[in-house]
Amino acid sequence: MPHTADINQETKYKLNNGLEIPVAGFGVYRISPEDTEERVYQALKAGYRHIDSAVAYGNEKEAAAGIRKFSNETGIPREAIWFTTKLTGQQQGLEETKQALRDVAKDVKESIGYVDLILLHSPKTSSQRRLEAWKVLENAVLNPETSYIPIKSIGVSNFGEAHLEQLLAEARVKPVLNQLELHPWLPRVALRQYLKKHEILAEAYSPLTQGERLEDPELLSLEAQSGISKAQLLLRWSYLQGFIVLVKTNNPERIVSNLEVLPKKDDDWKVSLDDTIWKAFDKPESNDVVTWGHNDPTLFPID
């Protein structure tokens, strides 16, 4: 019995604040500033409507410029495109986060006017600074007239259950999502159950393991047996898990092929994996990350 999902390239998931986020996202991690504007433009031309950036990537300004270029050339309004950015650990804290929002405004406001989603990129700072940062972000959402740039939604990235428990105990605004490294070797089942309980969506980055697992013997065998590429198998798994999925590539052809994992709105086929592959991808819990120097940030200790 195949596992299927009724989603397509235009599918959006509803957040706990009522807004809707496109399920397929294009990330600009490790894309040079010189290439970013054109890659974002190409991704939007291919059909993506969700761009994921971060202060740490050093290309927010260029990503926003790519959105503006696409919107100006096609007439598709800015409101049809979702833009996420993230604040570093060093930008967390009362004054630090206020300054961070000024810096984000300087980089992107002229091109795109507002930010759909700002995340705390990591819990790897002190509890006090995390909570202070969240209060600044909450204030920006609750009192937009006082914010340096309008912000529609706020969330977190790489937060474990302990970090979320601490945050939710004081939060006036609940995080809309938690962006995490997720793939079959890192399913994070317990954390995802916690997120679901609190109506926080899971967003997957590095669904292709940054290439580290692509020569896994079992994955190679599944590719040979199914005739489906390794990348397609892993992306299908992520979409079938119900994640918002971020893909990143500097290759224009892969920009297109990664999105083609999903059917177009009027296509008559569905994303699917057969039961054999599904069971093969049913792996045990682990904290074996391929990012963050192989040190899982969700385990960062609470001080």
Image: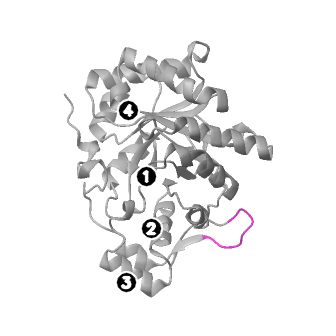
Please report the residue visible at 70 percent of the width from the left and 54 percent of the height from the top.
45
The quarter of the displayed image where residue 284 is located: bottom left
Q: Which mark is residue 205?
A: 1
Give the structural element (helix, strand or loop) at label 4.
loop
For the residue marked with disc 2, what is the amino acid?
Leu
Residue 86 rendering spot, x and y as whole percentages = 45, 35
Against 238, residue 233 (above or below) is: below
The answer to if 267 sits in the magenta stretch is: yes
Return the residue at label 4: 88
- Quadrant including the C terminus: top left
The quarter of the displayed image where residue 271 is located: bottom right
| Residue extent of the magenta highlight | 264-270
Tell me if 227 is positioned left or right of 44 in this view. left
Tell me if 223 is positioned left or right of 250 in this view. left
Marks 3 and 2, the one that precedes in the sequence: 3
Please report the residue visible at 38 percent of the width from the left and 19 percent of the height from the top.
96
Query: Which one is in front in this view, the residue at disc 3 or the one at disc 4?
Result: 4
Please report the residue visible at 53 percent of the width from the left and 37 percent of the height from the top.
60
Residue 208 rendering spot, x and y as whole percentages = 42, 63
Q: Which mark is residue 221?
A: 3
Front one among 272 and 140: 140
Return the residue at label 2: 234
